[in-house]
Amino acid sequence: MSTTNTILTGTPESLQAYQEVMTQSQQAVAAWLQQPDMYQGKSVAELRERIALHFTPEGLGNKQAIDRAVEYFLKDSLAVHHPQCVAHLHCPSLVISQAAEVFINATNQSMDSWDQSPSATIMEVKLVEWLRSQIGYPAGDAGVFTSGGTQSNMMGLMLARDAFFARRGHSIQQDGLPNNLRNYKVFCSEHAHFSVQKNMALMGHGYQSVVQIKTDEYSRIDLNDLLEKLATTKSQGEEVMAIVATAGTTDAGAIDNLTAITTLAHEQNIWVHVDAAWGGALLLSEKYRHWLAGLEQADSVTLDFHKQYFQTISCGAFLLKDPKHYELMRYQAAYLNSEFDEAQGVPNLVSKSLQTTRRFDALKLWMGLEALGQKQYAAIIDNGVSLAQDVAAYVESMTEVELVMKPQLASVLFRVRREGLDDQQTALFNQKIGDALLDSGRANVGVTEHNGVTCLKLTLLNPTVTLDDIKTLLALVLQTAEAL
Ligand SMILES: *Cc1c(COP(=O)(O)O)cnc(C)c1O
């Protein structure tokens, strides 16, 4: 293979190679999309045995490399578009998102400086402005696209902490962490995403800094427990750097009372970060937008578009209410965002992000919004929420299964009961059902624990799935249980 067709350029040889690889790949994807199985069902050991890198002195050439990827990757991939693939917050993607990826990949723009992504930088800034207006934030452009919820949560926690210490005259950016770290806490729901703990550990505070607030019958932060723990913390001479509220907990889809929490926190001058990685989808909803009331009061917000916005991975955003807090993480790199550039109003997004080199993921949401329009986007989001309510009603009508939690967003938690099994045995039984379904390659159902109860989880994001599909799936669950 010559260099003229290994690198993507405008030469006839390169263009021909590009067209060939794209055609071959698209045909393979089309064939894969039509495979009947959700998964071919190979075990960990089988895949480990089968898959090997074939790196040779001369190279295989594009065609053979693609053939091998089809054989070893594509055929044994999980069909996320399959109606029985409902384990996780893991969506099938929009067709238009594929076109956006073609542009993102072929142009390889990098969002860290304007001279590496001129039109892309302006589009991302405009999309951030638009997202702020959807949240109800003041006009502005404080925010950035991220790799997803984990990174956005990190930004919220970090800026909250740095703002907290800045108010006390201490710059974390300059001087690092203070000595008496154990006195400073972050509050979140006991059902908050694990990235709160993980991020606090990465930030040097350890898990000990995270205080989990008890939840009510709907898995939302219990406001009484929140008040009590705020008081206890104070009486022990400790302080709260931030409260993380969740709009859409990963399993139950619970949305904390954002108005109450932000009001209460702001009375005590505490930063509220809202993790709306999942529930943020309701920003576009027609029926359920009001469930996010109070979001505009949050100091910072996490949104994820590779969940119920149906974008390909990765695509997330972090929004910051007051732009002045971005000063806390500002770094001037002469080669990217020089003072000279900034004085001329050149928007270099590097100082808004934890990343330097960064993909133009914003294009996917941009094109998705334009292609679908408000009504169609609302419809595919609302579909999952309504379907979960219908599925829950159906589950309640079945004798062999028990609804564990009333659905709030698009998930249904339930468990299969069998005569004579105690709670511990029922837990193992449900775990085995989940495993057997994936082994068979026919369905991927989540297994999780909710308030100590091991249960199965259906995450009903896919707008092409119907109640009948889920009835078929539940019949398969029972059939699988029967065979155990
Ligand atoms: C998925 C999820 C996250 C993590 O987001 P990633 O994009 O996977 O990093 C954070 N919080 C909540 C509530 C989530 O559901």
Image (cartoon, rainbow, N blue to C red):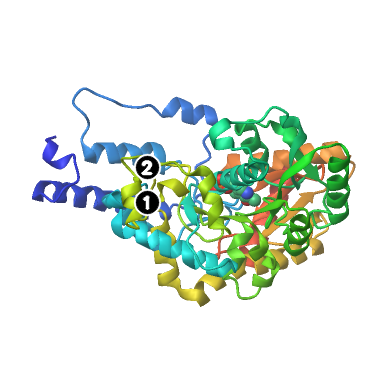
Q: Residue 153 in the image: state x and y as whole percent.
A: 60, 46
**Residue found at x 88% / y 54%:** 224
Mark 2 sits on what residue?
A: 357
Spatial CA distance of label 2 from label 1 is: 12 Å
Residue at point 65% right, 39% down? 435
Residue farthest along the front direction in this orientation: 169
Q: Is residue 293 left or right of residue 307?
A: right
Residue at the location (78% across, 60% down)? 406
Q: Nearer the viewer, mark 2 or mark 1?
A: 1
Q: Earlier in the sequence, mark 2 or mark 1?
A: 1
Can you identify the residue that label 1 sits on? 348
Q: Is residue 482 left or right of residue 224?
A: left
- Could you tell me residue 116's position as x and y percent? 29, 49
Question: Which one is nearer the viewer's eye here, 235 or 96?
Answer: 235
| Residue 351 appears in the picture as rendered | yes
195 or 440, nearer to the observer: 195
Q: Amino acid at mark 2?
A: Thr
- The mark tally for this picture is 2
Q: Position of residue 351 (x, y in %)?
A: 44, 46
Report if the beta carbon of the residue with label 2 is closer than 8 angstroms to ligand 1. Answer: no
Q: To which quarter of the image does residue 69 belong?
A: top left
In the foreground, 256 or 301: 301
Crowd rating for badge 1 (residues with CA inside 10 Å; few <14, some 14–19, many 20+): many
Mark 1: which secondary structure? loop
